[in-house]
Amino acid sequence: MHAINFATAQRHRVWAVMAALFAGAVAVWLPSVDLALQFWMIVIPVALFGLSHGGADPVIINAVKVARGRSSAQWLAGYVALMALTVAFIVWQPTLALVGFLGLSIWHFAITDCMFLPKGGHAGVGWLSGSLPIIGPMAGHPEQVAMLFAWLLQQDPALVMNIVLPAGRVLMLGWALSLVVVMALTRPSSRSAVLLELCALAAPMLLLPPLLAFAFYFCIVHSLRHFLLLLGAERQAINAIDVRMLARRAAPATAGAIVLGGISWWVMNSGAANLESAWLVDAVRVVFWGLAVLTVPHALLVALWIAPKHEVNH
């Protein structure tokens, strides 16, 4: 069973809260930002930093095969097979694939966030934290989220808006009610820390434009926590490993994912009659569906890796 040092988790939690409070304050004064500008603002951080945490999956495969058997080739074959099945399912049932990907993302984010809870925090805090990057933008910026979903599903934005608007409100209400329950189940000594962390994270998720909100959580919260867990686990086996060594090991798979995304975008636009109007829609589809294809095997692999669970050394 792997463990992450409590002091390390605490430092990241404090840093993440400060960053979230700053981002929330900036969002209040931020002028309207259209989806095209948001895309250019996030594409490099998501490609180089966000994707790199999944690029480290070969490192996890090496750890999982030791604990669970089978060769690296078999694990990699299964990984690629899941990617292929995900692509087929997206083509066959894009709406179900979108709903499934959002739910899978919440689960994946939650099991990572649970490991960084304040001491005495209820496990539900992880789910509240992991659901914010999905629920927050839907409640805070339903028009832009509906447009993004419409591009992904190739549907009328007005029809999608009729679903996203009430869904965002209901989900946010459910989140708030769940917060009350979780606070009641959390140790009194930890309630202030838990409440501060969740409220701080909720601010940028609700106030920032949707792509910026997702990039903030994906890069600053989730990816950093994933790397801290991976670095802590690897140091149990290799005392000399550091961030640079881990980055080098993640680089090949990260570069491969970026190249595949670029090729997919080029193929999608090669026959476009109006490249200027098509590039953004296709770019969003490539990035979002590309993340979905990568997330399915990544999330399942990480779940196997952390089972039964990581522990924080208090």
Image (spheres, rainbow, N blue to C red):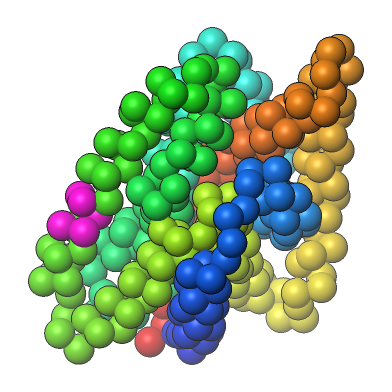
Asked if the magenta segment contains residue 122, the reply would be no
* Residue 71 image offset from top left, x and y in percent: 69, 39
On screen, residue 180 versus residue 251, left or right, reads: left
> Who is closer to the viewer here, 69 or 189?
189
177 lies above or below 286: below
234 lies above or below 84: below
* Residue 104 image offset from top left, x and y in percent: 44, 40
Q: Is residue 220 visible?
A: yes
Q: Residue at x 49, y 76 (%)?
A: 25
Residues in magenta, as a range: 173-177
Q: Residue at x 47, y 44 (%)?
A: 105
* Residue 217 image offset from top left, x and y in percent: 53, 61
> Who is closer to the viewer here, 165 or 92?
165
> Who is closer to the viewer here, 251 or 30?
30
User: Principal SS element in the magenta part?
Assistant: helix
Asked if the magenta segment contains residue 175, the reply would be yes
Q: Residue at x 44, y 23 (%)?
A: 158
Q: Quadrant of the C terminus?
A: bottom left
On screen, residue 238 versus residue 9, left or right, reads: right
> Who is closer to the viewer here, 66 or 109?
109
Q: Is residue 52 visible?
A: no
The image quadrant that residue 195 belongs to is: bottom left
* Residue 22 image offset from top left, x and y in percent: 53, 79
Count of numbered labels shown in the rendering: 0
The image quadrant that residue 74 belongs to is: top right
On screen, residue 200 versus residue 185, left or right, reads: right
246 lies above or below 267: below
Q: Residue at x 75, y 74 (%)?
A: 243
